[in-house]
Image (cartoon, grey):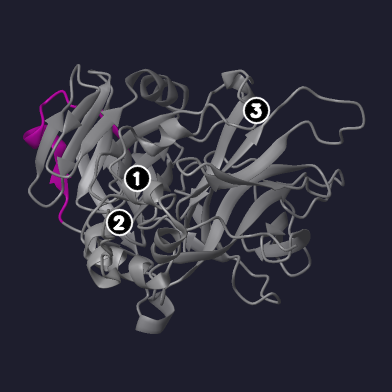
Amino acid sequence: MEAAATTTIPEAILVEIIVRLPLRSIARFKSVCKQWKALIESSYLRRVFVSLQKQSSSSCSLMFGTDYPYPIAEAIGFHGCSTWDLPRSPGSYIMPFQRYPNLPTRSYFYRSSSNGLIWIDLFPTRTVGMTFYYKTFVGNPVSQQWVEIPPPPQECKATALVTRVDDVRNGVVLSFKVVRTCDPDPDPYDQSLVPNDMGMYEWRVCVYSSETGAWSFKRLLSSVPVQYTAYYPPVNVNGMLYRWERIVDDSAPGSLLAYDFFGPEDHDHCQVIPLPLPYHEDVRRCLTTSGGDVIYIEILYGRLKVWKLNNNKNDSGSSEWWHLSGEEINLVSVVGSDFDCFPMAVNPFNADIIYMWSVQDSCLVSGNLRTQEFVVHQELESWRNSEGCYSINTYHSKGYIEDNHNITMVLMLSQFVLPQWMDPVPCLPN
């Protein structure tokens, strides 16, 4: 009896088949055999897949910054796109946390996200000799790849996660840094609020680097006072961190404090970027990002304005930090005479799509800034379009807006956006 013939699929054809599948399926195929695993993990297949999906959106969650007593919660989730084909939004994969599956919800805190990685702190039962009562992890909750970060050398407050990517290799995350703001100096002349002889204020941070596996201390300088407790998680773009600093005088809009944590080590000066003027005490505003741009949105008496940060201000010779990205929109005329809302964010992939929270209807409002078409999602917590499925966390959004209704603030949601490929978490040094 003759043995059955074995058919071998040419590698080029196999690649063409695999790259047309979602990442959720491709990940499972790595266990078929060693040959498939090596092919799927090759830079060639990754490059072909990313090129094919270049115009597609990825799954994402717009997350609330959490602190006690708030649980981990997303405001808006997007899933079901062709890139990942997830059955639910990325934020829903954070819990339960596999290493501590029995911890109660209130023991987990979402801190920050950058280029597909997130930072969470969890508070297990304290043990004898435990210096810090929390544990820090950085990783990807969808792939369940996590690395534990050692405790910082001193007490400090969670600030942000920043990453360095390789643009040549289509955004591969090369390394990350965990940034914590140090406790205020007990000295009454603490220079975070009192300037030094040069008129500069200090922002003291502890920074953990995945490249060195160690914490370092940095003393950064700012021309405006630096608050120890940030009101919202900062936004970050390509290693640059933007945190809002409220000026003592409420008649001013405040400023963004910007610092590149992957810049030259000897550079210790923060950029201070004033928010657009004129400022009004009744304005409602948010800061967000989309496609690598920092975007500032304000709504005053039903009139909507959207600005983009001029990242090349110094190179272009422009005297303005911000420029309007479109014409002012009268929301009262396009949505309704009693329309009252807070801006929340724009779509991470399309800056024309805006999300707002309707105060009177307690629901999400989405809109297209280019076509000026808006949808009030009354009694809807999920909907679908040609790109995938959207979900809105009505309960937590309503509570969050009510608890943060102080209109002098700048609302800043954290963007957890899955990457275009299932890259591993950067390895720590051996």
Viewer-proximal residue among 25 and 338? 25
| Element assignment for label 3 | loop
Q: Which residue is mark 1?
A: 24
Q: Quadrant of residue 258?
A: bottom right
Can the viewer see residue 302 in this picture? Answer: no
The span picked out in magenta is: 327-343
Q: Pointers 3 and 2 in contact (CB under 8 A)?
A: no
> On the rendered image, what quadrant is the C terminus found in?
bottom right
Q: Which residue is mark 3?
A: 100
Q: Earlier in the sequence, mark 3 or mark 2?
A: 2
| Element assignment for label 2 | loop
Q: What is the crowding at mark 2: few (fewer than 14 residues within 10 Å), some, or many (at least 20)?
A: few
> The residue under label 1 is which amino acid type?
Arg
Q: Which residue is mark 2?
A: 3
Q: What is the crowding at mark 1: few (fewer than 14 residues within 10 Å), some, or many (at least 20)?
A: some
Q: Earlier in the sequence, mark 1 or mark 3?
A: 1
